[in-house]
Image (cartoon, rainbow, N blue to C red):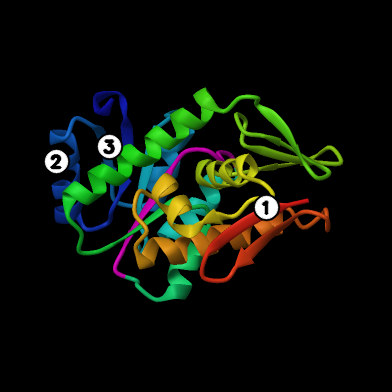
């Protein structure tokens, strides 16, 4: 699978970017490394990539702003942030700007490789295996293949991970899905950081579903979540 994955790496530290690109290339990925958000946007106008990796703290267009710009035209390509910013509000901003994963510096290259493979697999499996494609959630229509929520003809496009989480909750609707089950199914690990990330995604899904007051994602404290309508 790796040699079919094309990656755009945006890292303004040349030495670090070269090391990351070299290691990802050794793992079988096709990597293009640029050093600014401006260069990245020019490349994205002409090329498609399987996955994007953005450093957060860059001069000019930073990683979060770059992600927001990308999401205006592409809601599905996975985005991983690399950053030394570790405050909870930074993590929240990362996901709200359109990121799918958030890796703190310094990190092990093996961990980055695993996260890339997981995100790409999630996107492919979601498109291939979710049948039926369109289901009802209260007054919403949820198209799991196109990753869209439709309410009164208004279409909202979800990220791959948002769609996967909503699909999991839908399949178990009216029943409790434990945090451990959700985290292991979607993130592969139920550690504290992933648990906080799940909370962010639940908040985002609640906002997306707020047009129908009959649809709720209930938090069963200390246990998990339940989608009801």
Give left or right: position of 12 versus 94: left
The boundaries of the magenta stretch are 73-84
The residue pinned by badge 2 equals 22
Decide which of 13, 225 is in the foreground and name it: 225
From the image, tell me which residue sits under label 3.
32
* Residue at screen point 62% across, 30% down: 146
The structure residue drawn at horizontal position 55% and vertical position 57%, both measured from the top left corner, is 201
Q: Which numbered dot is residue 79?
A: none
Mark 1 touches mark 2? (CB < 8 Å):
no
Name the one closer to the observer, 156 or 35. 156
Is 219 covered by the magenta stretch? no
Vertical side of 202 occupied by 152: above or below: above
1 or 2: tag closer to the N-terminus? 2
Q: Position of residue 12 (x, y in %)?
A: 27, 56
Evaluate if marks 3 and 2 touch, with contact meaning CB atoms under 8 Å apart.
no
Q: Nearer the viewer, mark 1 or mark 3?
A: 1
Q: Is residue 87 left or right of residue 3?
A: right
Q: Is residue 74 magenta?
A: yes
Distance between the alpha carbons at the discs numbered 3 and 2: 10 Å
| Quadrant assignment, res 50 | top left
């Amino acid at each position: 699978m790796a040699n079919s994955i094309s990656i755009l790496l945006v890292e303004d530290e040349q030495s670090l970017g070269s090391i990351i690109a070299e290691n990802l290339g050794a793992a079988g990925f096709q990597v293009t490394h640029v050093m600014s958000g401006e260069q990245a946007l020019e490349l994205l106008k002409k090329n498609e990539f399987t996955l994007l990796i953005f450093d957060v703290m860059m001069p000019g267009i930073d990683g979060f702003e770059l992600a927001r710009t990308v999401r205006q035209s592409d809601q599905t390509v996975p985005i991983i942030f690399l950053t030394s910013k570790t405050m909870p509000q930074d993590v929240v901003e990362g996901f709200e700007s359109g990121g799918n994963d958030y890796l703190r510096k310094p990190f092990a290259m093996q961990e980055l490789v695993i996260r890339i493979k997981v995100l790409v697999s999630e996107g492919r499996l979601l498109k291939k295996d979710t049948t039926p494609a369109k289901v009802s959630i209260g007054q919403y229509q949820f198209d799991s293949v196109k990753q869209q929520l439709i309410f009164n003809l208004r279409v909202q496009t979800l990220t791959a991970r948002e769609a996967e989480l909503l699909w999991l909750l839908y399949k178990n609707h009216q029943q409790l899905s434990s945090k451990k089950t959700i985290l292991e199914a979607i993130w592969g690990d139920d550690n504290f950081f992933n648990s906080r990330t799940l909370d962010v995604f639940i908040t985002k899904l609640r906002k997306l579903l707020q047009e129908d007051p009959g649809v709720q994602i209930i938090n069963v404290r200390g246990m998990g979540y339940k989608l009801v309508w």
